Image (cartoon, grey):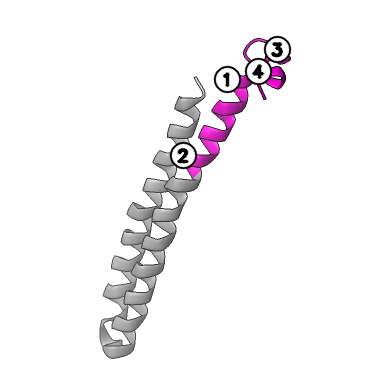
Amino acid sequence: MLQLLAQQDPGELEAGLTAVGRGIVYGGAAIGPGIGIGIVVGNAITAMARQPEAAGMVRTTMFLGIAFTEALALFGFVLSFIISG
């Protein structure tokens, strides 16, 4: 293993580990919003099924919740670029 590391160009290992780190950061940042959006939409569907007359208000609140939750994924995306330097 050490011989393989010794044969690499200078900075090649750092570039590879940075790419792996970016993938882990963005992957981790995408899991939370995915789960959050699923919970928000599921609860909104349940609320509309129980009380159809409030569907408009529930739908508006659902879209706001989705937008705020999706902002977390964008923060993770930006963070993955900040890590790369």
* Mark 2 in CB contact with mark 3 (< 8 angstroms): no
The circle drawn on residue 25 is 2
Gap between marks 1 and 4, in whole Å? 5 Å
In the rendered view, tell whether residue 21 sits above or below residue 33: above
Q: Of callouts 3 and 1, which one flags the residue occurring earlier in the amino acid sequence? A: 3
* Mark 1 in CB contact with mark 2 (< 8 angstroms): no
- Residue picked out by circle 1: 14
| Category of crowding for the residue at label 3, using alpha-carbon neighbours closer than 10 angstroms: few (below 14), some (14–19), many (at least 20) | few
Gap between marks 3 and 1, in whole Å? 10 Å
Q: Secondary structure at mark 3?
A: loop
Q: Label 2 sits on what residue type?
A: Val
**Main SS of the magenta segment?**
helix
Foreground tag (2 vs 3): 3
- Residue picked out by circle 4: 12
Q: Secondary structure at mark 4?
A: helix
Foreground tag (1 vs 2): 1
Q: Secondary structure at mark 2?
A: helix
* Mark 3 in CB contact with mark 4 (< 8 angstroms): yes
- Residue picked out by circle 3: 9
* Mark 1 in CB contact with mark 4 (< 8 angstroms): yes
Gap between marks 2 and 3, in whole Å? 25 Å
| Point 33% across, 83% down: residue | 46
Query: Which percent across, then down, holds residue 68?
Result: 33, 53
Q: Of callouts 1 and 2, which one flags the residue occurring earlier in the amino acid sequence? A: 1
